[in-house]
Image (tube, rainbow, N blue to C red):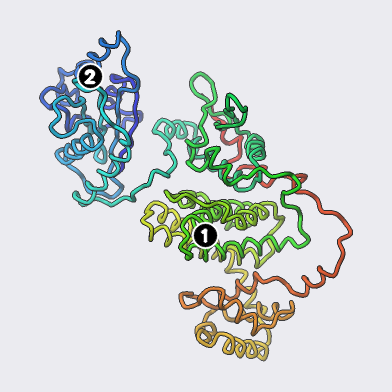
Amino acid sequence: MVPDVSTGSDTRGLIVYLFGPGRRDEHTDPHIVAAWDMAGAPDPGRDPAATYTQLAKRLDHHVDLRTRELGGKKPPQHVWHCPVRTAPGDRYLTDAEWAEVARRIVRAVGIAPEGDEKACRWIAVRHADDHIHIMATTVRADGRRPRTHHDGQRAQAECRKIEAEFGLRRLKSGDLTAPRTPTGAERAKAERQGQTVTARHWLREQAYAVAAAVRTEADYFTVLQSLGIKVKTRLGPETGDVIGYSLAAPGDTNAAGEPVWYGGSKLAPDLSINRLRERLPDQKVADRPRHVADPAALWRHTTTAIDTARTVLDSGDDAAAQGHLAAFGDALYNIASATTGPHRAELRSAAMAFNRARRSAIRADHEAATALRKAAKELAYASGEPGGLAIALLFATVHLARAAAKWHEQRGHEQQAAAAEEAFRHLQAGYQQAAAPVLADLARRAPRAATARRFEQDVRAALPDHADRILADPAWIALTTTLAHADTAGHNPRRLLAEVGTQRELDSAEHPAEVLNWRITAQPNRRTQAARSRSTTTSGTTSMSATPHPLATPVATKPEERSRRR
């Protein structure tokens, strides 16, 4: 059951909408199911003699008294509105049950406390099977305003109780860290313009993707503008420093033809200027990442950092763990940006899904996750996927997403756990799409039987407790090819198996040979490293500031596709 609290100032306008046909004739049999006084509330849906104006005057009675006291000026935002909707698949609720829901919610939020004869006037209108609209005028009979602080949170808490008592689907409890959902008007606008997402949602995804890739606050605003997004900063009166910012999607205007602005914190809590600065320390151009001689090292660094993040989740340091989850959210955007192939869509979906899991009521220690964030930002500039290393990285993300879901679940973060689980499913699907042909190719190029038998002896000697499961795994044949490559690259296969086998336990691994395959793939080529250390670089490196930014096009929709008309 989902309540959605908002406020306004047009009593009659809202009543006309509630009892009208709806924007697309979707309202069926509008009528009042509960009110402050059922006998005193005219019902235009049931009484032919009742009018919208009569009902508005009855609701506004106390507001009118207060208006006269204030010399003709109505209190601001005095109309309180809260649609309450059951979840898809829930059973049908009768009018009497919806009436009880309405009475409990107005009590819970302070609109009409139990036994309070001077409480605000309110009505609950039903015009569909699955929801009602509660409307109130927030001036009491004694002229005071009701105490509705945290009304949305209180309405949510009451709905959780109602769900349990009415046998409805139990929705996830929030912790006030969720982003604002698009309003009905925003959704209707997107639908009219043929857009699949609202401007608010689109801007949020662009902001997250850009923040994940850039190094500085200045770059953040510059890249957003290069995507066609309008940027408006708010400066401090004394220092002239940026103290806030707002974004507007290309072509998104109001009735007056002006841009529709969304503040950073209104897009998501961690997109406020202060939260961004915690993740974007101001750095000099010389400190930015540069091209490296071995591009594959970027993928290895990120894989190692993600494996480390799994260890941090088990460390008991919640602030550091939350910092790593925030950095992992950035990493997912950059991995998707650096990836090619059909699985890229799944990785983008995973990044968007994980946004709800990247923050909670636990304050993140972002400095603890510096290594992961740095590695992920370097990966944003990678050119081309280095074969199996990219699959090894995807494999690591799958396991970190599952670990994140478990970590949130253990701390009662229901919405975050669900979001991490959704990201896990997208990552798993992307990994399977990318890994299947690579594993098949490795199996096709398996070494001779004599070499495979030698590797079998190495497995039994290095990992005796897991040897039978490893050798029975369908990925064992592919692993023999990877071991042969590692042998050629200068590794001792037996020593390498022992090393990677103890990085994390293998008992819970469903496919231990597959796990070992990607762990070994992520190991550096020792002979290449040795040759590189002996060589002398004869040409200077080029700063990444001179290269095109990886987000030259938006992650979800091109700017011109966001063009919208009044």
Residue positioned 43% across, 53% down in the render: 419
Q: Which residue is mark 1?
A: 427
The amino acid pointed to by label 2 is: Gly
> Left or right of 437: which side holds 98?
left
Foreground tag (1 vs 2)? 2
Q: Name the residue at the left extreme.
A: 39
> Left or right of 556: which side holds 71?
left
Residue positioned 35% across, 28% down in the render: 23
Say whether disc 1 or disc 2 marks the residue closer to the N-terminus.
Answer: 2
> Left or right of 550: which side holds 38?
left
Q: Name the residue at the top extreme.
A: 71
Q: Name the residue at the right extreme.
A: 538
Residue positioned 56% across, 53% down in the render: 327
Q: Is 71 above or below relative to 180? A: above
Q: Position of residue 363 (x, y in %)?
A: 47, 49
Say which quarter of the image contains residue 55. top left
Disc on res. 483: none
Say which quarter of the image contains residue 540. bottom right
User: How many marks on residues?
Assistant: 2
Q: Is residue 52 visible?
A: no
Q: How far is the residue under mark 1 from the one under mark 2?
A: 56 Å
Q: Position of residue 296 (x, y in %)?
A: 71, 63
The amino acid pointed to by label 1 is: Leu
Q: Is residue 461 visible?
A: yes
Q: Position of residue 389 (x, y in %)?
A: 65, 66
Secondary element type, mark 2:
loop
Q: Which residue is mark 2?
A: 143
Secondary element type, mark 1:
helix
